[in-house]
Image (cartoon, rainbow, N blue to C red):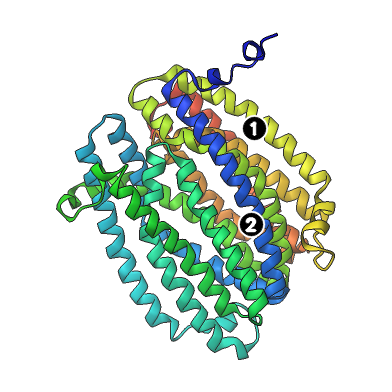
Amino acid sequence: MNIKKIINYNSFFEGNIRSVKAKKNIIASFLIKGISIIIGFLLVRLTLDYLDQTRYGIWLTLSSFLTWFTFFDIGLGNGLRNKLAEALALKDYNLAKIYVSTTYAILSLVISIVAIAFVVANFFINWTVILNTDKALAPQLSQLALIVFGFFFLNFVIKLIGVVLYADQRPALANSFGSIANMIILIVIYVLTKTTDSSLIYLGWTLSIVPVFVLMLASIYLYSTDYKSIAPSFKYINFKYSRDLLDIGVKFLVIQIVGLIVYQTSNIIITQFFGPAEVTPYNIAYRYFSTINMVFTVILMPFWSAYTDAWVNSDISWIKNIIKKTSKIWIGTTLLGMFMLFFSNDFFRLWVGTKIHIPFQLSLLLFIYFASLNFESIYNVFLNGVSKIKIQLILSVVQAITFIPLVLVFIKIFNLGIFSIPLAMVLSNLYGIILSPVQYNLIIHGKGRRIWYQ
């Protein structure tokens, strides 16, 4: 019997060019993400060994402040992603080069101003109060903040090469940069554990320099080869096009800010109410169950810009087909999450030992949160790709308004402790789970009107 007749591997990569490109990226992304997950787990264990639970909690809380500064991209990253994808779909490389050059210019100006403001403000910030820790650490934390934030601002502009790759439906390559950086970081931290005493400063230097170095090399190479025709150039900077980038970008910005409020304030709330040591078990459980979201995102992300291409070319049947397939995949990832939940306590003992206790109720709530987030993402990735996100924007504002009050009610009135965080995350996101599929169906069947089509 000819095995090739039963399993034709080549047929998997046949069909619509969009689907083929997505499949290749999904497979490559899974390999990259698999490596990334393993490295991530090893990094947590190695970093915990290098520091201790309290200092690790301090590091997590301090680094969580970084994401608050991501809103200073004023949505330009996602604005560039959609507009560049449209230009590439139309094969208008001159317009694509203008979008890329203008985005680099605007973002460089904004981040330069923010960086200068932060350096000045850092002289007056008392990080020991913010992080609820020993006052003797004040000089060290101030120095650490300058290192971490300084390289973060530099990374802010350089990482636009990843946006270009996403717009060109090459997310696997974009994701590989993080894995390469983490591999180098893992090696460096291992060396630090053997050659130095516990130091937040050494850790800060390592985690800050390496990602910038990797992205800088990637940018130089790609803009000299594959993307030479759209590489940023002073000659092609045209601020007249900034409105195109910002119109959709600002909407994405608000949605991103809500994500920051929900996730990043969690660490701050836990630190303030329960102490920095409690940030560690929460983040370990969060990272474990976020794997469900990571797996599903790997599958969905290649379709964001593919949806843009299909929408520009009026290929509605392809869009419907992909939505049906990703809905079935969601069921599979949810079953995977249930399996992870069942064995969560055993895995935590194997991963971080018995020093850190993670309650099963926390695991259950985080599983529910990520399963519901994945369901909403099925439709939101399409809506993002075709720039119909006004309802998503409104729902995000509602979520931002309700999240913190819910957390405070659960902590102060119901005494739910650390469980208050994931419970509030689930409840504040219920509207999105219901309305995202409704909006998709209205748009795809040509019935979307007014706000449903914006």
Determine if residue 292 is in view: yes
Q: Residue 55 appears in which quarter of the rendering? A: bottom right
Q: Where is residue 146 in the image (x, y as percent from the top left)?
A: 45, 78
Q: Indicate whether 167 appears above or below 22.
A: below
Quarter of the image where the C terminus is located: top left
Closer to the camera in the image, 56 or 430: 56
Q: Could you tell whether 319 is left or right of 33 in the image?
A: left
CA gap, disc 1 to disc 2?
Answer: 24 Å
Q: Where is residue 310 in the image (x, y as percent from the top left)?
A: 39, 25
SS type, badge 1? helix
Q: Position of residue 138 (x, y in %)?
A: 56, 87
Q: Which mark is residue 355?
A: none
Q: How crowded is mark 1: few (under 14 residues within 10 Å), some or many (20 or more)?
A: many
Q: Residue 83 appears in which quarter of the rendering? A: top left
Residue located beneath label 2 in the image: 40
Kind of residue indicated by mark 1: Trp
Residue located beneath label 1 in the image: 330
Please report the residue visible at 46 percent of the width from the left and 68 percent of the height from the top: 209
Quarter of the image where the N terminus is located: top right
Q: Indicate whether 165 appears above or below 192.
A: above
Q: Where is residue 427 in the image (x, y as percent from the top left)?
A: 66, 47
Please report the residue visible at 48 percent of the width from the left and 65 percent of the height from the top: 210
